[in-house]
Amino acid sequence: MRVSFAELYRHYVNCRRNKRNTVNALRFEVRQELALLELRDELNSRRYRPGRSVCFVTRKPKLREIFAADFRDRIVHHLVVDHLEAYWERVFIHDSYACRKGKGVHAAVDRLQRFLR
């Protein structure tokens, strides 16, 4: 699979949507074009290696430890999910509802109610 700059840029924009003001996102944004070109080259030459995750503790909604991927790795996660989702959507049966676009708990409950009538 060859990755284009345009494809990586699209995933970068999606990734930064909710992370715009984080230190890692801002650091990446300062040199975004060069960073995306480097990432594209690493992916295409199969030299990409994930970075270190950041560990922190949050208290909302309860006390828990979080391991957050580096922003650069989050872009790769978006890319991978996009490619895997395209494959798996064709494999799943119509009545699979978890973690699918346009589906979910409410759609599953509606469908179940239709079956029960």
Image (cartoon, rainbow, N blue to C red):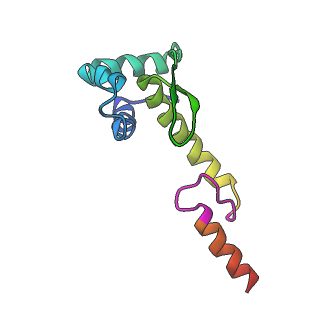
- Asked if residue 97 is among those painted magenta in the image, a careful observer would answer yes
**Residue 75, percent across and down?**
43, 30
Q: Residue at the location (63% across, 75% down)?
A: 110
> Where does residue 38 sit, x and y in percent of width and height?
37, 16
Along the viewing direction, whichever of 78 and 109 lies nearer the viewer: 109
- Left or right: 96 with respect to 69? right
Q: Which residue in the rendered view is the most extreme toward the right? A: 116
Q: Is residue 69 above or below residue 81?
A: above
Magenta residue span: 94-105
Front residue of this view, candidates 99 and 5: 99
- Name the one closer to the observer, 64 or 77: 64
Confirm whether the magenta stretch covers residue 24.
no
Q: Residue at x 30, y 19 (%)?
A: 27
Looking at the rendering, which quadrant does residue 109 occupy?
A: bottom right
Residue 72 spot, x, y in % from top left:
42, 23
In this view, the residue farthest toward the left is 30
Q: Residue furthest bottom?
A: 117
Quadrant of image for the C terminus:
bottom right
Q: Position of residue 13 (x, y in %)?
A: 33, 38
Q: Quadrant of residue 67?
A: top right
